[in-house]
Amino acid sequence: MMVQGGSSDAHKWDREDAHLLPKASVSFATSSSITKRSVVRLAKMLFGSLTSLLAIGATLHLVEAAASPPKAKTVNGTYVGYDLPEFEQQVFLGVPYAKSPPLSNPEPLTESWKGTRSAQKYGNICPTQSDERIFKAVNATFSHDCLNLNIIRPANVRAGDKLPVAVWLHGGGFFAGFGAESNTNTSYVIRASVENKTPIITITLNYRLGFLGFPGGPQAVAAGITNLGLKDQRIALRWIQENIAAFGGDPAKVTLWGQSAGAISITHQILAYGGEDSGLFRGGIAVSGTAGYGTNSLFPLSTHLTDGYNHIANASGCAGPEIDDSLECLRKIDAFTLYQAGWDAVAAGQSRGEIALYWWPAVDGDFIKEPPVSQLDAGRFPRNINLITGANSDEGLLSIHVHSAGLKTEEQLKDRLHFYFPTARPSTIQKILSAYPVDAPSSPYSLPMKGADGKDPFCEAMKVANLTCEPQTRRMASILGDFAFISRRRHSAESFAKYGVKTYSYRFDTDPTDIPISEVLAPGFATHASEYTYFFGFPPEYNMYERNSPVVNVSSHLRLSRGIVDKLVSYIATGDPNTKKEGMALWSEYAFELDPGSKWRR
């Protein structure tokens, strides 16, 4: 189920409370599609590389353009898309939104033309550490020239129709993912919006990732090229303001929607440049991520970011006494070489059990003026927006291969916690351990899933993943999940609501084992990215990487999926997730009461 949070005691809600729709059936069968992943593959998934938002799924073929294909006249010129008659939708693919000189700030498009240009195939993608099978599935090409977007709309939409717009920002830990991934599919979302008589347009886009998107070190600071990926997103939003009306969208009704790194990006866009009122969007749906994790301790000259720069420079032949300007040297390196160097850097860090913070948004005094937590606490952000923020109950399970494997004693767990929280006092570490007792079946923020036949669901999940069921592993997974996702969700909801921003909060708590979309889903748990199939409605024949079982048409899963999508569509269209459909629970706004000591009760 998706558990909604209208107040600050969201952590008290039971998994068995059907706050939205009936709970889907749960299976602990060890024949699940989960397999043991390499350190790099699992870490890459930590912040959601299962992300994109396109009308064309992995199993959906492209149809020939109709006799009169759709056209849209932008500021620069006219694009020609094509029809998807079987979905009653139209698409425009690979539309450039900015220029991206290597390791430089994005620049607006200045070229214009007469006649038409084709928007009937995907554009280049930015170098990404995504699994090769994903980008090869769409014949993607790495290039520095990669800032393009894809627009999907219902059929028969015309310029000036002013439909609400959802802009998807993909996840992937800021080093993986791209806009044209075939793992998700907004045809389902758009079709639901049409059926609900609130049609919307969806957009997905590329932004620069890894070293090319988030370079650090003295050279990057001196050149003013920090947080390039976030700046790419910003200039894309400006392009949308100037041009979406030509595709039938309303620039005054733009909602950002993202998962993991994409959700973190949404908070950064709200807080950008000290919280300026940009007018580029009116709301956001932040799924499993919010600014604050990592960024609070990262500055462009931080060791992680400087080490990342040095690693790339060395691997690319741009370091050493014979190199006068390493940055200028790196700007001349081809995209694929830099991709390989970035992959090696991430792999080296993950093999040491490190979080991949070589490439991450950093406080630069410009786009990110100050640590996001401080900015949220002080209320330095626009008030004329609204927000949905949510997380899954068992986010931390995705990290066990990298961050928790091999933990057998409490002393080992303490050492690992000191590694991740180097400034924490021993007494603080002990308080954390006390909050997560060794015999606790789950995080204190959620009640445990009930196992089949009295079996421990965590141990069953570990068995499927070819890992031993260690109590310290369970504790570490709970701590990391709550630290990175649950606590951040609650803090951001608290901060925005406190200063008058209309805010909704949810916790996703359904086990999607019957719908195998990922190797890393732990049976019996709502792990990171487990909400995806409910959002995007995978077709029954869908097979990720051609290895998973077909989707099981479990009626309760399907009802839950449609219920979630109806709420998201309603929010995108109106700013309110509540629909008029019968049987749908009311989501109240996130709110607080003041105690006598004038402190916000959490």
Image (spheres, helix red, strand yellow):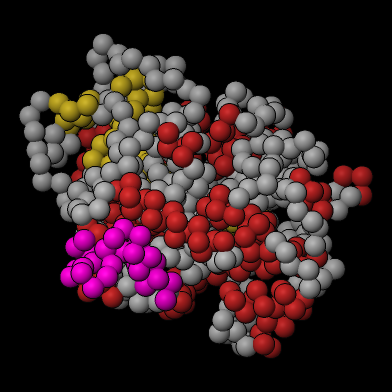
Prevalent SS, magenta region:
helix
Residue positioned 44% across, 20% down in the render: 61
In front of the other: 268 or 293: 293
Residue drawn at (21%, 48%), measured in percent from left and top? Answer: 98
From this view, report whether residue 402 is shown above or below residue 299.
above
Q: Which quadrant would residue 560 be assigned to in this image?
A: top right
Task: Find out whether residue 18 is within the magenta segment.
Answer: no
The answer to whether residue 79 is left or right of residue 379 is left
Comparing 167 with 279, the one in front is 167
Give x and y (percent) for residue 278: 27, 60
Q: Is residue 225 left or right of residue 39?
A: left
| Residue reaching furthest to the top | 67
Q: What is the count of numbered marks?
A: 0
Q: Is residue 358 above or below residue 526?
A: below
Q: Residue at x 59, y 55 (%)?
A: 39
Residue 493 lies, with reference to residue 194, above or below; the image says below
Instruction: Check the picture and name the quadrant holding the C terminus.
Output: bottom right
Instruction: Compare residues 117 and 136 and report the one nearer the observer.
Output: 136
The image quarter containing residue 395 is bottom right
In reply to whether residue 318 is colored magenta, the answer given is: yes
- Residue 593: horizontal and vertical position, in percent? 61, 74
> Position of 332 compared to 89: left or right?
left
- Residue extending farthest to the right is 453
Q: Which residues are magenta?
A: 303-329
Residue at 37% over, 72% down = 306
Residue 389 in the image: above or below residue 352:
above
Residue 523's spot in the image, x, y percent?
74, 45
Q: Position of residue 76 (x, y in %)?
A: 13, 39
Residue 294 visible to the viewer: yes
